Amino acid sequence: MGVGAGRVSESGAPSPGGAGRANSCPPSSMASCAELSEPSAPLPAGVPPLEDFEVLDGVEDAEGEEEEEEEEEEEDDLSELPPLEDMGQPPAEEAEQPGALAREFLAAMEPEPAPAPAPEEWLDILGNGLLRKKTLVPGPPGSSRPVKGQVVTVHLQTSLENGTRVQEEPELVFTLGDCDVIQALDLSVPLMDVGETAMVTADSKYCYGPQGRSPYIPPHAALCLEVTLKTAVDGPDLEMLTGQERVALANRKRECGNAHYQRADFVLAANSYDLAIKAITSSAKVDMTFEEEAQLLQLKVKCLNNLAASQLKLDHYRAALRSCSLVLEHQPDNIKALFRKGKVLAQQGEYSEAIPILRAALKLEPSNKTIHAELSKLVKKHAAQRSTETALYRKMLGNPSRLPAKCPGKGAWSIPWKWLFGATAVALGGVALSVVIAARN
């Protein structure tokens, strides 16, 4: 029957213990909770309080017996009785109390709804609920939003979902849209005004993914980012950069690509390497020293090699082959470029071209076990390929050793006798014709 309302005092107010239990009545039993709040006869001395279901079962009987006794005692003095419709009803003030208590119980029973955020408080950036933005401090009036290609400076505080702060960068500088940072920042900062502070909640796929970032960010960790957009300025003009500025910019892009590669995000890695190569190879209006040019060339070779590795992971074999060929134009003995070019050709089934390239790489570094293993594997595959091709050619041209054998039941002259008879007849006819011609002459 559930938890009851306990004892009720003579004044009609529930005792403290009883009121606490009455609050737990379900909504469907509101009427029964109100009945228990009405005044009832006190229990005899020495009798312990009964359980709820016993009280409910005996309340009506006890009240009925008391009413019968009162009627028998006061049969002679009917004039003092109140009108029939008022009999047994408490005063107006007491009659309102049970209903009021029931409403109090019902109000205490219903949980208070949590205040829902305003519809425009959280912005669902991608529409899938995995990347959301909330403005904490709006930007000043008239402030603008940054655009792709601008260099922005933000104050970033990174926390886990449980509130543990794992990283803080007071002056984080990156180019918007160049994939220099995690996608959560690259996608949310363009929606902020300069001077604005916002909270960004991001799923792990827009942060550090299944690898995480050791030692502070575990794998598959969703993050809360508190971002303050400080400044947004136009990006540098590549033609006006000095040699050292080009080197610094290309190195930053290359390091971003390395970070993406380590997280197995090969698309973003290839994009960062492309940007680094663009910074190196763009035309310059500023003179550079020979040392700066040599430094840029070394950096270009590194970026091309890393780009080829990313393209190979993405199965973009033609692009990877082109990147390796560009490296070998500058450095014909580059072992990494030779090895990756051999692997690309092997993936395309060009074993006869891949094997000499891997042999050249092994000649440059005989102790390299990786090249040894790859070369041995290619030699076996090439032998199997040649064997398959030979069997295919034999099948196409026919195999004389598999021609059907002659039937042993027939003699040597049994099959061509018609041909022999015809030849003999032709020979005899020719002789006869020769005799006739000779007789006429």
Image (tube, rainbow, N blue to C red):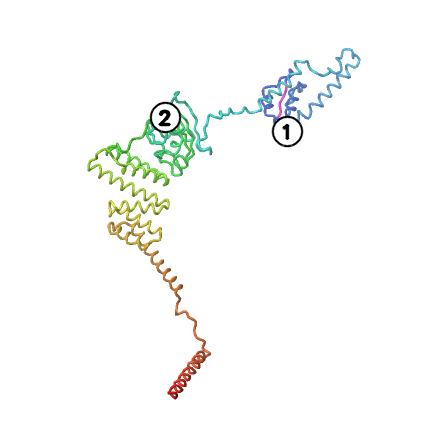
Label 2: few (<14), some or many (≥20) within 10 Å? many
Residue 179 rendering spot, x and y as whole percentages = 35, 35
Q: Amino acid at mark 1?
A: Met
Residue 392 picture quarter: bottom left
Q: Is 338 located above or below residue 149 in the figure? A: below
Q: Is 363 located above or below residue 56 in the figure? A: below
Magenta segment, principal secondary structure? Answer: loop
Residue segment shown in magenta? 1-8
Q: Are marks 1 and 2 in contact (CB under 8 Å)?
A: no
Identify the element where label 1 is drawn.
loop
User: Going 68% across and 26% down the picture, which residue do you hit?
Assistant: 57
Residue on which disc 1 sits: 1
Label 1: few (<14), some or many (≥20) within 10 Å? few
Residue 411 picture quarter: bottom left
Q: Nearer the viewer, residue 205 or 38?
A: 205
Left or right position of 87 against 297? right
Identify the element where label 2 is drawn.
strand
Of callouts 1 and 2, which one flags the residue occurring earlier in the amino acid sequence? 1
Residue 6 picture quarter: top right
Residue 313 rendering spot, x and y as whole percentages = 36, 45
Disc 1 versus disc 2: nearer the observer: 2
Residue 280 rendering spot, x and y as whole percentages = 27, 37
Image quadrant holding the N terminus, namely top right
Distance from disc 1 to disc 2, alpha carbons, whole Å, reads 61 Å
Q: Amino acid at mark 2?
A: Leu
Left or right position of 291 against 11? left
Residue on which disc 2 sits: 229
Residue 409 rendering spot, x and y as whole percentages = 46, 78
